[in-house]
Amino acid sequence: MATVTRNGNSLVMFGGENSTNSYTNDLYQLTQTSKSFNWQILEQNNPPPGTWYGQAVLTNNDNMYLLGGATNATHTQLSAFQNYQFSFESKTWTASPNNSLVMTNTTQFPYNRMQHTATYDNQNSIYIYGGAFNGSILFSDFFYLDITTQQYTSLPTTGIPQYGHTASLLSNGKLVIIGGVVEEPNGNRVLKSMSSVYVFDTKSRTWENVNVTSPGLPSSRASHSAIVTSDDRIIIFGGDSGSDERNRMYLNAIAILDTKAWTWTVPSVPGIPPSRRSYASAGLLNGNYLTVAFGTARNILFNDVNVYDIGGNKWIQSFDSNDKHRSGLSGGIIAGITVACVALLVIILFLLWKFQRYFRWTLSRLHRDIWKPRTGEPVWAETTRIIFQVILFFVFIVFLVFVLNQAISSPNITQKIEEPTGTVQVPDVRFCLDGYPTYPSTDFRSPGVTCQTDNGYSCTQFIRPLNMSVFQPTFADSFGSVTCFLFRSPTEFILTSTSGQNNGSRLLFNFWGDQTIEYGGIHVSIYPKKMNPNTAVYNILDGPTTLMQPDAVSNWLNNEISDIQATNVFDIQPFSYSSLSYTLVDHTYLQSVGWNYVGFSSISNSTPEVVSTFRQEAPNPRYTIGHSDLGFIAIFPEAFVDTIEREVKMYTLVNALGFVGGIFGLLIAIQAWLFGFRPRSPWGAIHRWSTGDMKRSLLSGLRSKFKITESGIPLVHPVHHRFSVTDLNREDFDEPEIQRIHRVEERMQMLETLFKAYYVDDEVFRSLDDANRAGEIIRINNARAGGSHGISDSGDFPPSSVLADLPRNEKMMDDEMSTFTSGMGKLHHPDSFQNEFSRHDTDQSESSNILLTHTTPHQHNTAT
């Protein structure tokens, strides 16, 4: 394509070839914005014929010249150099009167050519150098065109025919010729070495062959692209080996020529480089971006846009973060970080000084929680235990980090779920008849598609033609005219697995067209209803709205233009039978959000997809004898199932918790096996580390619920003074026996109460008590019913006094300890406790599950 840079931010491109036409005359403008590109088709009046390998120059922002190039009429004959001028203001092309000149004197007027260069010097002159005609004739002549007089003037030449090169004009008026193919005196054509360049001085009109040194010499190339930066560096991109198409190789490397030192640099460029190509359109936009578009590599025609950030030396995908090109941190940022670190250090030291008491208490508490040697245990045993505890803790942390990292870096896997169903939706199907000319709708040769199901139901009403003026798919075979139809049924139209009153289980399509056409093809594509890009392109509003984003539709269009769409696309030969089975899949993809690492209630996107299998028989040479159509295809579900493919994480944090819990329990068991079991406190971290009002409320609750007497606290105070290691000098060890028994009773009562509150569950004890009561009552009732013996205290059955002596089922009061005993100075007679046993029920006590028989206790001297 002939390309110029306009307004400093746009590429204007004319002509070139595409997959269906070798000579096009479209005019496009690609404009770079702050974040992306805008694509525009420019209006043009009286356009020139389709042209390839032409050159364009912009003399000012309002006029563009198209110079040379091959057209369908001129590519096989030597003609005058073609010259067209386009006015952006009037949007009109003007052909030069010399275009039809009959060539008689080659020294005064150049022949038409391609793969030459045309360079504007900003002083009304266009320099035209080299080129070739139809690959058979190479030119070594050199002209300049005065755009004010439209006259060509011959200039001195290098004497070496050359084409496929680039010509770059420097700020000092020197024209630098780089690369290309040159013809040696013996007629051999070779790539021009990159170790030297031809330089033409437009002021003195003299040539110079300049040797170029390099730390890394770029590969020789032809048909590459070149731009000149503001500091007179020449940047080249791409190109090929210049050999025949079968053996041609392509490049995508960047090379930079410093024209002040005449040295080459081949930088290592990070980012995603463009595909290898030649004949690309390139320009310098916004003073810093080498923009590369289109180009070709053998049979591949590219239609992408690539940007090289010159200042940042990288291929970029967006402009968001490329406004500044700095490496490292500025002095201000470094100073700010230093000041922040110093301030943070001062704050930490101040907090340590201000709350030093709290820190000391914390360290002391940590030491007390860690260092816990048992009584009588040597120091080495506790030291070894702590060392092993640290080692096991380190092992646990390593495993924890491993498991968490495994969950964070977990790959996604897909689970397939199939549920049998009696009905299945049908996909959208596009049919494109390639190479079949159009006829009036009443002509049986007019291209078309008809549909019916296997039970005879007509579904042709769901087929509509697509407007080829909006978009026409491109097929590499290029048989000729393309006509496309879309089968799109309403969602209520479904296929059924059983026979009867239904739509059927298969779709049967017939293709229609001119049977006399020798070369033609039928292209079939299927889509889920909600992922059909044709609805967006052709503005089809009925049925479900497509879920495809605009960029996805654009990518689909690019693939259609390049004919590289491969998924669910099938080619059918005329006069053949084909079958296609499909499976509609509801594919849920995990979104890239942190919650999905947890492992439940995942956040996902549901995307309809279709999976298809195609089979075609060989064309039947006798097909037309009994058929007036072009072919037949049956489309049906692979199976009558609802298919869901769900993407999940292979490892999640929920899975990790199971692994971590198992390893933690194993490490605890190892430590208990090595150093014995150590009972755990019934208090947790909240109780142990509480402070202030929380701590005071806990201690107050203990003090009010468990009254402390002079008997001391079990497991804290000794049973008697004579066992104290700090009270050995006391001699009043002799106490009355009743006081000592009373002391033991108080301590036992407190011990039982504390154990029941914090260590044991009293349900089985209460159940035993209930069972005992029920047994006694049953025996007494049985004794009454017998009547053979009088009931007395000396009888075989216990008298009523036994029942009276059973412990009462009463709830113990919160201040039971205070009412039971009031201190060592207040003693009760032993007989006063004979019938005072009450169940130690508390708010946490659980009732017995044993059903009791409640009967009236037996009374003396009453009838039974």
Image: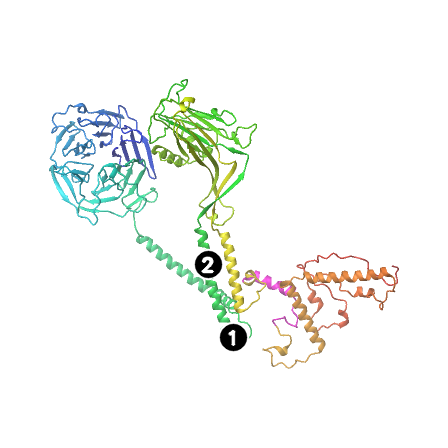
How crowded is the residue under tag 2: few (<14 C-alpha within 10 Å), some, or many (20+)? some
Q: Quadrant of residue 108?
A: top left
The number of numbered discs placed on residues in the rendered structure image is 2
Left or right: 3 as drawn, with respect to 637: left
Q: Is residue 166 magenta?
A: no
Badge 2 element? helix
Q: From the viewer's perspective, tell me whether residue 109 is left or right of residue 862.
A: left
Which residue is label 1 attached to?
378
Residue 776: horizontal and vertical position, in percent? 78, 62
Task: Give residue 493's position: percent from left, percent from top.
Answer: 51, 29
Dot 1 amino acid type? Pro
Q: Which amino acid type is shown beneath numbered disc 2?
A: Phe
Q: Earlier in the sequence, mark 2 or mark 1?
A: 1
The residue nearer to you, when weighing 634 against 148, is 634
Q: Is residue 583 left or right of residue 757?
A: left
Answer whether residue 195 is visible to the viewer in this image. yes
Residue at 36% across / 57% down in the picture? 339
Give the residue pinned by disc 2: 399
Decide whether residue 712 is among the magenta residues: yes
Numbered range of the magenta stretch? 689-716
User: Marks 2 and 1, how far apart in space?
Assistant: 32 Å
